[in-house]
Amino acid sequence: MPIFVICILFSLAFYLYYRVKAFRSKKPNEKKWLSAKATLALGSFVAFFGLNRLFISTTPVSLAVGITFIAVGGIAVWTSYKAYKYYLPHVLEEAGRSKG
């Protein structure tokens, strides 16, 4: 399915973008926040890859691999979203301290 390929490429691009931004960041909370966003993109990459695998072929091994990738990607998306929400107020506070 071409839509999954596009989603895979976008999530990989976002992962690389946020990983580079996190690497270049000097503020500790912003670094963790950007790292959580990068992990969210990586989890969506793995989940989309698993979904794509389900539509390519329907052998038992392919189904097991696809379901495993979807589960691992979903867990990564869920935990990184929680980390994103946790660090967001700290990043805003840190940004306010550096301006004032």
Image (cartoon, rainbow, N blue to C red):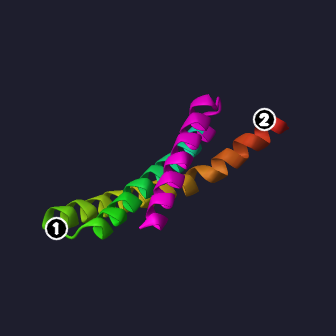
- For label 2, the SS is helix
Residue corresponding to mark 1: 59
Quadrant for residue 66, please give it.
bottom left
Q: Amino acid at mark 1?
A: Thr
> Gap between marks 1 and 2, in whole Å?
55 Å
Viewer-proximal residue among 96 and 58: 58
Quadrant for residue 62, please give it.
bottom left
> What is the x, y in percent for residue 88?
63, 52
Q: Residue furthest right?
A: 100
Q: Is residue 29 above or below residue 11?
A: above
Magenta-colored span: 1-30
Relative side of 6 to 49, left or right? right
> What is the x, y in percent for residue 97?
77, 38
What is the number of the mark on residue 98?
Answer: 2
Residue 20 included in the magenta stretch of the image: yes
Quadrant in which the C terminus appears = top right
Viewer-proximal residue among 71 and 89: 71
Residue 13 seen anywhere in this rendered image of the structure: yes
> What is the x, y in percent for residue 83?
50, 52
- For label 1, the SS is loop
Q: Is residue 70 above or below residue 98?
A: below
Q: Main secondary structure of the magenta part?
A: helix
Residue at the (50%, 52%) spot, across then down: 9
Relative side of 58 to 81, left or right? left
Residue 4 included in the magenta stretch of the image: yes
> What is the x, y in percent for residue 76?
39, 55
Residue 83 seen anywhere in this rendered image of the structure: no
Nearer to us of marks 1 and 2 is 1
Quadrant in which the N terminus appears = bottom left
